Image (spheres, grey):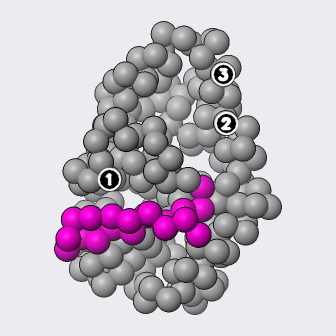
C-alpha cells in the first residue's frame, strides 16, 4: 500500500515566511504550477482515493489533481495544518521579536509545546493519525492526501520514520510529494 502525502503548492505567506497554520490562504501563481506538476506525477500512480485538508490552499491543489486524474476527492478536516494561534500571520522574525521565550520553547519542545490559542504537534499527530489509520484500514493500493508541512512531519514522526530533530528540515517543501510505502515502513520525498 502506498500513500502519497502531497503538500499544497506555495502561497504568498509561504514566500513571506509567515506562520500560516489554519489561516485560510490561497495558492500563489507558482503554487498553482506546483499543483499541476504534482497532478502529472500522480496521474501515473493508479490512485484509488484522494483526501484533502479543508483549507483553501489544499482544496485548490486537490481540485487540480482531481481534474487531472478524473477522481473526486474527499474533504477531511483532520488533515488541517497545526494551529499557530497568536503567531498566525506573523513572520518568523516578528514572532521572535514579539514572543522570544515562546519561540525558544517551540523549537526545543516541539512535540508538546502549544502556542497560545493554538495546538501542539502531539494534538496534530492524534487527529491526523486517526484519519490516516482509517485510510490504511480501507487497504487501497494507493491513495493521496493533500495536506500541510506540519501534518506531513507529524505523520512521519508518528510512524517512526523521522526523529523530532528532523521536524525543521526541508522535508516537505510546498508542492512536494512524500510517498509512504506502508508495507516496507519507508518513505521517499519526490519534489515535482
Label pair 2/1, CB-CB below 8 angstroms: no
- Residue 107 in view here: yes
User: SS for tag 2?
Assistant: loop
Q: Residue 93 has which mark?
A: 3
Is residue 92 highlighted in magenta?
no
Instruction: Indicate the quadrant where residue 66 lies.
Output: bottom right
Secondary structure, magenta segment, majority class: strand
In space, the residues marked 3 and 2 are separated at their CA atoms by 9 Å
Label 3 with label 2: CB-CB less than 8 Å: yes
**Lateral position of residue 184 relative to residue 99, left or right:** left
Instruction: Report x, y in % for residue 89.
Output: 68, 32
Q: Which residues are magenta?
A: 174-192
Residue found at x 19% / y 74%: 183
Judged from the image, the secondary structure of the residue bearing numbered disc 1 is helix
Q: Is residue 186 magenta?
A: yes
Callout 3: SS: helix
Q: Identify the residue position indicated by label 2 in the image.
A: 17
- Which residue sits at x=67%, y=75%? 36
Location of the C terminus (image quadrant): bottom right
On screen, residue 90 versus residue 191, left or right, reads right
The answer to whether residue 2 is above or below residue 25 is below
Q: Is residue 151 visible?
A: no
Q: Which residue is mark 1?
A: 156
Is 192 rendered above or below residue 21? below
Precedes in sequence: disc 3 or disc 2: 2
For the residues bearing labels 1 and 3, Cβ distance under 8 angstroms: no
Residue 180: image location, x then y, percent: 33, 67
Q: How far is the residue under mark 1 from the one under mark 3? A: 27 Å
Amino acid at each position: 500500500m502506498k500513500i502519497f502525502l502531497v503538500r499544497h503548492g506555495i502561497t504568498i505567506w509561504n514566500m513571506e515566511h509567515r506562520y500560516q497554520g489554519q489561516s485560510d490562504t490561497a495558492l500563489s501563481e507558482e503554487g498553482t504550477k506546483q499543483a499541476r506538476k504534482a497532478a502529472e506525477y500522480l496521474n501515473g500512480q493508479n490512485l484509488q482515493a484522494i483526501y484533502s485538508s479543508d483549507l483553501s490552499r489544499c482544496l485548490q491543489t486537490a481540485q487540480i489533481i482531481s481534474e487531472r486524474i478524473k477522481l473526486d476527492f474527499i474533504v477531511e478536516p483532520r488533515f488541517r495544518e497545526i494551529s499557530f494561534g497568536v503567531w498566525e500571520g506573523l513572520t518568523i522574525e516578528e514572532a521572535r521579536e514579539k514572543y522570544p521565550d515562546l519561540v525558544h520553547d517551540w523549537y526545543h519542545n516541539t512535540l508538546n509545546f502549544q502556542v497560545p490559542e493554538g495546538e501542539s504537534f502531539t494534538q496534530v499527530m492524534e487527529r491526523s493519525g486517526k484519519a490516516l489509520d482509517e485510510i490504511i484500514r480501507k487497504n487501497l493500493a494507493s491513495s493521496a492526501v493533500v495536506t500541510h508541512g506540519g501534518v506531513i512531519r507529524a505523520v512521519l514522526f508518528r510512524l517512526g520514520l523521522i526523529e523530532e530533530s528532523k521536524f525543521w528540515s526541508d522535508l516537505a517543501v510546498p508542492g512536494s510529494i512524500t510517498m509512504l510505502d506502508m508495507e516496507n515502513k519507508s518513505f521517499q520525498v519526490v519534489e515535482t
